[in-house]
Amino acid sequence: MNMNAFFAWCFRAAAIGCLSVIFSARAQQSPVLPKAVIDGTGPGWYALGNEHFVNVNCEPDTWTWTNGMVHCTGKPIGVIRTIKLHTNFELVAQWRHLQSGGNSGIFVWATPESIKALEQGKGRLPTGDVFPTGSTTMEPFPPTSPDGKRSFPRKNLSKGVGEWNHYYVRAINGEIRLWVNGEEVSGGTHVRPATGYLCLESEGAPVEFKELRIRELP
């Protein structure tokens, strides 16, 4: 199967040692730099709603849309995809797990061939961080997996069950970068092919999305 890039949220940042980190930063007088906020507002951004997606291989009641909120039961394992193909874009989304044990995610640049295979009940959805599958290629940003194909997050910033997380995805000219809760954590470059559908994945446990917004770029 040829799903091009996938972002999973399996991790939660550990709180142990936070106090020592703060003291260390003060001792070294490291500057605290301001962070840019990407909230999906401004010229060119628009909301993604039910009308922008079609079911691929889920049950009719797997996904429900209510007042801008997207609820997913997590069963069966499958995806919904955007109606149109996307190449260069920025995407923001908020999500939260409602139970432990889930591994839902966002797919980027899913090819028509991969979607057709899913519709026919073939192939298996990948799990992981940011990585290419099938014939797709990518040069991942470090840290990478032992085989050099997968970009692991530099920090595990995802929050726990019931807490909202924020994703910002930037995909431009075959380069993809992921920010989790305001910090860039992973990505890759020289992705080929670098166009396809956006997908939301159902896998294992209930999950919710909100504030799904996209800005298409030249």
Image (tube, rainbow, N blue to C red):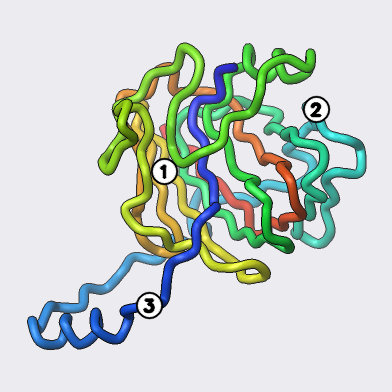
Give SS at disc 2.
loop
Given residues 201 and 149, the one toward you in this image is 149
Q: Which residue is mark 1?
A: 170
Foreground label between 3 and 1: 3
Give the amino acid at mark 3: Ile
Give the amino acid at mark 1: Arg
C-beta proximity under 8 Å, tags 3 and 2? no
The image quadrant that residue 207 belongs to is bottom right
- Is disc 3 surrounded by few (<14), some (14 to 19) or many (20+) residues within 10 Å? few
Residue 4 in percent (x, y) is at: 50, 25
Give the amino acid at mark 2: Asn
- Per the rendering, the mark at residue 119 is none
Q: Earlier in the sequence, mark 1 or mark 2?
A: 2
The residue at the point 89 percent across, 35 percent down is 59
- Per the rendering, the mark at residue 57 is 2
The residue at the point 40 percent across, 64 percent down is 182
Q: How many marks?
A: 3
Q: Earlier in the sequence, mark 3 or mark 1?
A: 3
Given residues 74 and 32, the one toward you in this image is 74
Q: CA distance from mark 1 to mark 2?
A: 27 Å
Q: Seen in the image, is 205 located left or right of residue 25?
A: right
Q: Is residue 143 above or below residue 114?
A: below
Q: Earlier in the sequence, mark 3 or mark 2?
A: 3
- Per the rendering, the mark at residue 16 is 3
Given residues 139 and 205, the one toward you in this image is 205
The residue at the point 79 percent across, 13 percent down is 120
Q: Seen in the image, is 116 located left or right of residue 1?
A: right
C-beta proximity under 8 Å, tags 1 and 2? no
Foreground label between 3 and 2: 3
The image quadrant that residue 206 belongs to is bottom right
Give SS at disc 3.
loop
Give SS at disc 1.
strand
